[in-house]
Amino acid sequence: MTENGSIADGNQHNFVHDIVRRDLAAGSTETVVTRFPPEPNGYLHIGHAKSICLNFGIARDFGGRCHLRFDDTNPTREAQEYIDAIEADVRWLGFDWGEHRYFASSHFERLYEWAEHLIGSGKAYVDDQTADTIRLHRGTLTTPGTDSPFRGRSVPENLDLFRRMRAGEFPDGSRVLRARIDMASGNINLRDPVLYRILHAPHPRTGTEWCIYPTYDFAHGQSDSIEGVTHSICTLEFEDHRPLYDWLLDNLPTPTRSRQYEFARLNLSHTVLSKRRLSRLVDEGHVDDWDDPRLPTLRGLRRRGYPPEAIRDFARRIGVTKRDNTVEFAMLEHCAREVLNRTAERRMAVLRPLKLVIENYPPDQVEHLDAVNNPEDAGAGARAVPFARELFIERDDFMEDPPRKFFRLAPGREVRLRYAYFVTCREAVRDATGTIVELRCTYDPETRGGNAPDGRKVKATLHWVSARHARPADVHLYGPLFLEADPGRDGDAFDHLNPQSREVLHDCQVEPAVADLMPGTTVQFERQGYFCLDRSSGPDRLMLNRTVALRDTWAKVARRN
Ligand code: ATP
Ligand code: MG
């Protein structure tokens, strides 16, 4: 595998690779050209990442190129903001389109000429029916459609009307241009599909130059052809559009011939992957914004602390097939753990602090103990962690009356403090309400570094921070956004929203070195998981998002259901 996650040696066996390999061997393709064609009407999500990795991966594996093409044919929903965000997200994921950034809108003039060409050859006509009427007369899977009364218009009349549509003479929705194919076709997409509609709306790129816009079907294959795309890879819902894709290329003087291939889109458990539903989550305030760490958007995952390598690795593992299925969110988390275990530096942080006082440790003494940054990466070095008489440990790491299998701290019991000393708990101090507020302990100065010269063993090693040196932090823990694995299966997905998808911990204490991290850095808090310093983090108040716990917690979620 290459550094950026694609299979460079070509031995991945997904069916698209097989097709490309076959075409190259047969000589029908000289250089493979693919494209990733987002509509700039929202932010990219992990489903798009599957498509990005496939398209850019194929290009790289076979020495070709992949274009970034904005499918911007619907100006009412599209915006420059999305164009910029999509570019940034594709780059972040580790892919580069070089000079090959295109817009369907850059091809508008040529598409228009081709529409006139179709009219000229009697294969398109202007229809004055409303969208509703057209839909009504399209027929069903079992009954043929009905011809429009305008189907028989002459070429000159059609040309005249189409030119006047372009000139802005007609209001929105009053006319469309349709292909004249076959109203009785078994494929509804071939029942005189709409090619152009009137829309007096400014476009993010072409401004007010146009008031007619091509449909997806009329723009996509032709854009592929103009750009010399050889393999146009899209998701299965476009399979039924392929005959139309081919019909248009057969009937237009397009420069090159591309082929469409379809694969199954990614479905991920416990979340939704459609821009419509994602925007609803944002608009209704179920999440804060498009980069809320609970969202499966690339921005959300990034803010949550996912490295792009983990997402590429995920895309590689799930593979590419023609059968729809749902991938467990746990798989994505597994990929994050794998990468982060290798790359993330370790730090210590106490999420639910309990004070621990070492009675026999000199009050003013501070030691700086060596802590390795990453046991998986010798090059990551070590750092000094301050140790003093008053520490915080995790509240969960102490039990006054422990059950048999609890090996951590308890009255009279000795444990190791990571990188530091053995300590023994002498007493738990309570406040007036009976809550334990402090542990009084003693330490063995002979055990510096965490080993006893007499060889005696302890059963637990706890993480800790020095109370005096620690920095306060807010830590956000995330659970699944939806409690159902397939929230959209029956009824409204939003009925299955998890009301507790975020837990905010306000009184966390982290070791001082955490404050030196750049926002966006993900570290492992020892024994807990991976945490990413949030962009909202400031010098006075650190803020971290839990990327993923150290161990799989989905078994617990499943039990709760
Ligand atoms: P959404 O349903 O989220 O709005 P879309 O298909 O409308 O997605 P586009 O911007 O049109 O979004 O998609 C760009 C490309 O990404 C298309 O080729 C599309 O097939 C692909 N894509 C979108 N969602 C997924 C997914 N869940 N899995 C794989 N590929 C996807
Ligand atoms: Mg779409």
Image (tube, grey):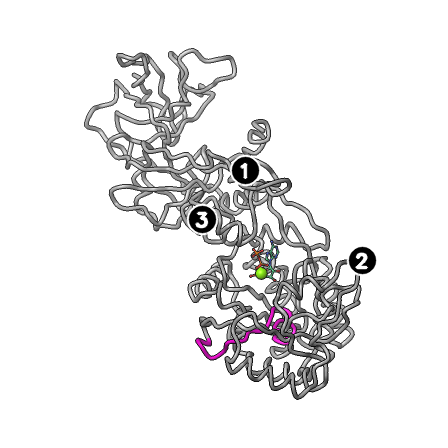
Residue at the disc numbered 1? 495
Q: Please check the rendered image and state whether residue 193 is part of the magenta-colored stretch, yes or no.
A: no
Q: Residue at x 72, y 85 (%)?
A: 121
Dots 3, 2 in contact, CB < 8 A: no
Q: Is residue 382 above or below residue 36?
A: above
For marks 1 and 2, give the one nearer the viewer.
2
Q: Residue at x 26, y 18 (%)?
A: 359
Q: Three-letter amino acid code at disc 1?
A: Asp
Q: Please check the rendered image and state whether residue 215 is part of the magenta-colored stretch, yes or no.
A: yes
Q: In the rendered structure, which disc, 1 or 3, sits on the residue that comes first in sequence?
A: 3
Quarter of the view holding residue 152: bottom right
Horizontally, is 194 left or right of 438 in the view?
Answer: right
Mark 1 crowd level (few <14, some 14–19, many ≥20, 10 Å Cα): few
* Front-lying residue, 490 or 501: 490
Q: Is residue 326 above or below residue 392?
A: below
Q: In the rendered structure, which disc, 1 or 2, sits on the residue that comes first in sequence?
A: 2
What stretch of residues is rendered in magenta? 206-224
Residue at the disc numbered 3? 282
Position of the N terminus, as image quadrant, is bottom right
* Front-lying residue, 559 or 208: 208
Q: Secondary structure at mark 2?
A: loop
Horizontally, is 547 left or right of 197 in the view?
Answer: left
The image shows residue 286 at horizontal and vertical percentages of 45, 42
* Front-lying residue, 110 or 43: 110
* Residue 63 in view (yes/no): no
